[in-house]
Image: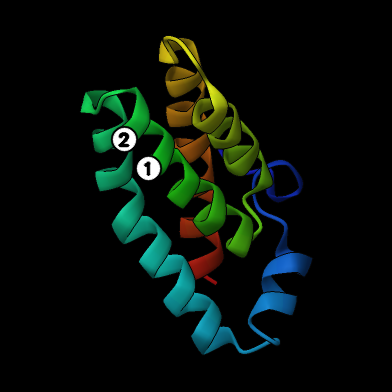
Amino acid sequence: MGCSFAGMLDLDHLSHQTQGNRSLEREVLDLFVAQIGGLIGRLQTEGRQERGEVAHIIVGSAAAIGAFDVARIARRIESSQGSADDDITELIAAVDQTRECIAARLAR
């Protein structure tokens, strides 16, 4: 599918967060990729309160690396009072696209 960095990963924000240190950038991107799968799995199985807590973690992690679409969708899940199935499906798609962007970035 390819990566649209502008839509899925704000490289200027990422560079600012890592102070231009490419080694640190790689480390935080690797950490995000390593953790996001487990967090998504928990979102799909947890109750409403726990789901909100997991979504909150995703918001912070995604915002830290500049994955603002992921953070925006996770924020909706965090504040959801009912079923968040549609939002979770949208989040999974956004995370998959973000992973593609991260893989492309790390391949450089």
Q: Quadrant of residue 51?
A: top left
Q: Quadrant of residue 21?
A: bottom right
Q: Look at label 1 and name its amino acid.
A: Val
Residue 74 in the image, given as x and y percentages of width and height: 53, 35
Residue 96 in the image, given as x and y percentages of width and height: 44, 37
Picture colour scheme: rainbow
Residue matched to label 1:
54
Residue matched to label 2:
50
> Quadrant location of the C terminus?
bottom right
Q: Nearer the viewer, residue 56 or 68?
A: 56
Residue 82 in the image, given as x and y percentages of width and height: 45, 10
Q: Look at label 2 and name its amino acid.
A: Glu
Q: Nearer the viewer, residue 36 or 7?
A: 36
Q: Nearer the viewer, residue 103 or 43?
A: 43
Q: Residue at x 25, y 36 (%)?
A: 42
- Contact flag, marks 2 and 1 (Cβ < 8 Å): yes
Residue 25 in the image, given as x and y percentages of width and height: 55, 78
Q: Nearer the viewer, residue 6 or 68?
A: 68
Side of 23 where 32 appears, left or right = left
The secondary structure type at the circle numbered 1 is: helix
Q: Quadrant of residue 17?
A: bottom right
Q: Residue at x 67, y 69 (%)?
A: 14
Label 2 – label 1 distance at C-alpha: 6 Å
Mark whose residue sits in front, 2 or 1: 2
Side of 29 where 6 appears, left or right = right
Q: Which mark is residue 35?
A: none
Relative height, residue 17 to residue 79 (above, below): below
Residue 81 in sight: yes
Relative height, residue 43 to residue 88 (above, below): below
Relative height, residue 77 to residue 98 (above, below): above
